[in-house]
Amino acid sequence: MTVGKYDLIVVGLGAMGAAALYQASKRGASVLGIDRYAPPHTLGSSHGDTRITRNAIGEGEIYMPFIRRSNEIWRELEAKTGRRLFHKSGGLIIAPATGGAGFHVRGDFVELSASLAEKYGIAYEILDADEIKRRSPLLQPRATDRAYHEPGAGVLRPERCIEAQLELAREAGAAIHTNERVTGYEAGADGVTVSTAGESYRAEKVILAAGAWIGDLLPAAYRGGIRVCRQLIHWFEAEDRSAFDPAVFPFVIWIGDCLDEFWSVFPAPRDGMAGVKLVTEQYHSSSHPDAVSRVVTAEEAADMYHRLTRPRLAGLRDNQVQAEVCLYTLTADEHFLIDYHPASERVIVTSPCSGHGFKHSAAVGETLAQMALDGGAEFDISAFNLARLIDAQA
């Protein structure tokens, strides 16, 4: 039996889906949001207590409109909810002066970030190793390392951002169904039917924002163009937690000589998770999200501390106090997907975010709402087309 008729159904309520639901409901549309779990949760890609946000986006100038608009929306959400969603900590991107590994781009990420900061009037500095150590004494760069420093950067609180947008959407009249898995959808001339394990729903338009599960909802020809990679988040005990407060400690993206040396450390807000957050990235293995191991092993914790952390950072004890698994859903070029479905413009597809999407999600949600309700997007989304998935498999 088909239940209800909506202007829009949003499938998946993580970073992109929650933002789209909020933006559409704010405009007065009748909206239903459906998620297989109960967001915010730790089973997808939109968790981890803190997420880095920067103003000069070295991944490409195509992202600059999204980051600028997202920053406006985060401030809007803070004003509406009274919750702190952003901590200004400053940020460092550290890399070898020559020969560093690629980070979401093919090029020198420090120089790419600096060039965009110059073009858009964003405050920044380039620091040598001695200056990095002088300003952040816990860090231990090599003499050959240098950093892009952006004082206006910081960290977002992803769970709070999702909660705020879902709550505001609900207050605006959106229906939200959690712990309900979408099993399929069918678009026709007069609307779209979305089926779940127990019901089916009708809408004029549908946004598919299923994160790591997006491949299950795409035509088979496109699925080979995306991969889901298991990533690890660790929190280690600090000798002095106050030394990692956002007021005094920046986030650090550390690009090593090869991809296996990538490492990041985050400031630790007083009301955040116990310990100090550390992450790495791996792209060697991928799997279906339902097959990903959710257990972070003792060997993985030891590798994070002894190989990646201890040579670069003082002030942490060899005591992992918390760990989570995060899912990165990647395209071959590591850029987003934001496009209409190849079979019907009643269906809009978004993600994968390739590990750098949360900072842009507020504006991506607004863009998705525009595509669903207005028939087009304010920002240029041509680089995020679905056809790339087929091209990548050729």
Image (tube, rainbow, N blue to C red):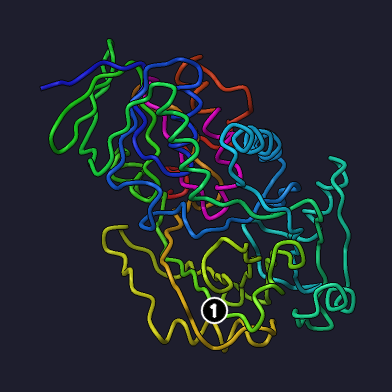
Residue 84 position, x and y percent, is 62, 46
Report the amino acid beneath label 1. Phe
Residue 389 position, x and y percent, is 44, 44
Instruction: Tell me where the magenta segment starts and ends, as one range.
Output: 345-366
Question: Outermost residue, top direction?
Answer: 190
- Does 363 sit above or below residue 280? above
In the image, 9 versus 351, the foreground residue is 9
Quarter location, residue 262: bottom right
Question: Outermost residue, left direction?
Answer: 1
In the image, 225 versus 171, the foreground residue is 171
Residue 381 position, x and y percent, is 58, 31
Q: Secondary structure at mark 1?
A: strand
Residue 273 position, x and y percent, is 52, 66
Disc 1 designates what residue?
236
Residue 35 forms part of the magenta stretch? no
Q: Residues within 10 Å of mark 1 (few under 14, many from 20)?
A: many
Would residue 386 be seen by someone viewing this image from the given angle? Answer: no
Left-right relation of 257 to 146: left
- Does 218 sit above or below residue 275? above
Q: In percent of the image, x 61 and y 77: which residue is there?
A: 261
- Does 158 sit above or below residue 302? above
Q: In percent of the image, x 40 and y 46: which residue is there?
A: 211
Q: In percent of the image, x 52 and y 32: which residue is there?
A: 365
Residue 355 forms part of the magenta stretch? yes
Q: In percent of the image, x 55 and y 28: which residue is there?
A: 366
Would residue 130 be seen by someone viewing this image from the given angle? Answer: yes
Could you tell me which quadrant the N terminus lies in? top left
